Image (cartoon, helix red, strand yellow):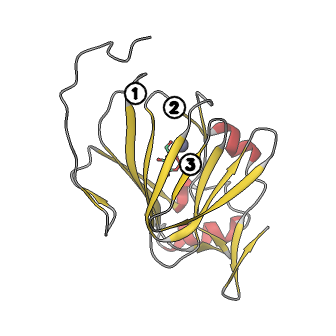
Amino acid sequence: MNATDGPLMTPWAVDIDLVTGTMAEPDRVLTRKASDMRGYYRDEAALEQLIGQDDPIHYEVFEKRIPETYGHLLLCISKLYPGCVGDECFMTKGHYHTISGTAETYLCIRGTGYMMMKTSDGVCHSEAMRRHRMVYVPPHWAHRSINTGDEPLISFCVYPADAGHNYGDIATEGFPRRVFIRQGKEVIE
Ligand code: F6R
Ligand code: ZN
């Protein structure tokens, strides 16, 4: 396959504020609320309570419109709000890439937390996320962001445009480790 297949794209640019973690004029904003997260947290009753209160936004993904084809790169801002479901920290659903041999870089712009990663044979690895730290998610690792702080955890993500998202396997398997805040302290178990 040739990366120049298809119509020639005109070069372009986007402004990203590295202090606030804001992308100017995104083409698409994906929003996940508490009610989109059923089945992901240990304490299902606490999640239902949260949904019943005001169903808060868990995270948003700000994207530019880029063809999801070989040769292009997708880029987005991932913004995960702070909070807990019971005592478990807010997190993204997590996914493998559909083409699992594709990597991703996450440059953390703001906030604190973890990138939790796992392979399909159950090996688990987490990396701390904090401002100015880049996490490299290698091919074949499912990945989920977890916010342990009290401000949004914001990352700038770049990955092959044809990677695709496989949510189904993680929805079934989960991750071997979860992150909690208990008595003001982080607990990973
Ligand atoms: C893209 C990627 C991120 C996530 C975003 C939301 O491959 O990893 O942009 O999509 O952080 O998380 P998920 O997709 O797991 O709901
Ligand atoms: Zn990804």
Q: Residue at x 32, y 32 (%)?
A: 66
**Closer to the camera in the image, 189 or 57:** 189
Q: Are marks 1 and 2 in contact (CB under 8 Å)?
A: yes
Name the residue type under label 1: Glu
Residue 86 vs 5, above or below: the answer is below
Q: Amino acid at mark 3?
A: Tyr
Residue found at the very far bottom of the displayed protein: 183
Foreground tag (3 vs 2):
3
Residue 38 point in image, percent of width and height: 63, 55
Mark 3 burial class by Cα count in 10 Å: few <14, some 14-19, many 20+:
some
SS at circle 1: loop
* Total marks in image: 3
Q: In the drawing, does residue 141 fall left or right of residue 78?
A: right
Circle 3: element type: strand
**Residue at left offset 45%, top offset 56%:** 107
Circle 3 residue: 136
Relative side of 95 to 124, left or right: left
Residue type at mark 2?
A: Gly
The residue that mark 1 highlights is 68
Residue 164 tag number: 2
Q: Between tags 3 and 1, which lies in front?
A: 3
